[in-house]
Image: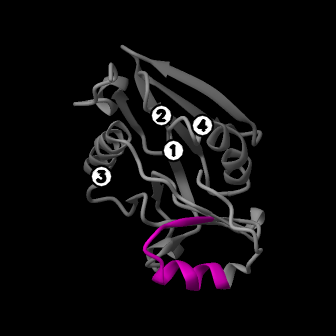
Amino acid sequence: MGYALKNRISPEAYLEMEMTSEERHEYVDGEIFAMSGASSPHNLIAGNLYMAFRAHLRGKPCQVFMSDIKLRVEAANCYFYPDLMVTCSEIDRQSRYVMNEPMLVVEILSPSTTLFDYNNKFAAYRQLPSLQEYVLVDAARMGIDCYRRNERDEWILRPYGAEESVVLHSLDLTFPVEAAYLDVDLTA
């Protein structure tokens, strides 16, 4: 997460600013935060997951989006740019820039965003009635944490490590953890 700008602004002013800004910003209840650039492992992991999700969803009414599409969390008064999200919502199909009803959100962790992604973003994302799974992917070591909403509206953590397969119930998709890390050098 980047730095906060001091003046609080309305969601409408944020959206107007964001349409012409060369940098991306996330919006959290009146504050905007400049987004920092991603590392090559981060980018490769996002690409690997996008390709796996896109191939699996081909021919289905669901869409997968990468980091340049905003996600509105109205209940928390936030706009985020998730690394990946999947939506099957007809409402989202009609929107060009902002999604509202994802069933899956993926964030790829970096040292500067890990705490925010696990705490603040997750607290906001949990307020999305459509969200079934929240996935956090470590860009420094092979590990994927999947938070899954159960029938009692509780979030259950299922961590996955090397040599395991990730099960995403929301997509009816299973893939080896290693598939997310193809061509990623974790020793650097």
Q: Earlier in the sequence, mark 3 or mark 2?
A: 3
Label placed on residue 137: 2
Categorize mark 2 by other alpha carbons within 10 Å: few (<14), some (14-19), many (20+).
Answer: many
- Is mark 1 in CB contact (under 8 Å) with mark 3? no
- Amino acid on which disc 1 is placed: Glu
Instruction: Kindly identify which residue carries mark 3.
Output: 54
Instruction: Kindly identify which residue carries mark 1.
Output: 107
Q: Nearer the viewer, residue 22 or 173?
A: 22
Instruction: Kindly identify which residue carries mark 4.
Output: 114
- Identity of the residue drawn at 45% across and 51% down: 83
* Residue 127 x %, y %: 73, 55
Q: CA distance from mark 4 to mark 3?
A: 26 Å
- Amino acid on which disc 2 is placed: Val
Q: CA distance from mark 1 to mark 2?
A: 6 Å
Q: Earlier in the sequence, mark 1 or mark 2?
A: 1
Q: Earlier in the sequence, mark 4 or mark 2?
A: 4
As displayed, is residue 15 above or below residue 2?
A: below
Q: Is residue 62 within the magenta segment?
A: no
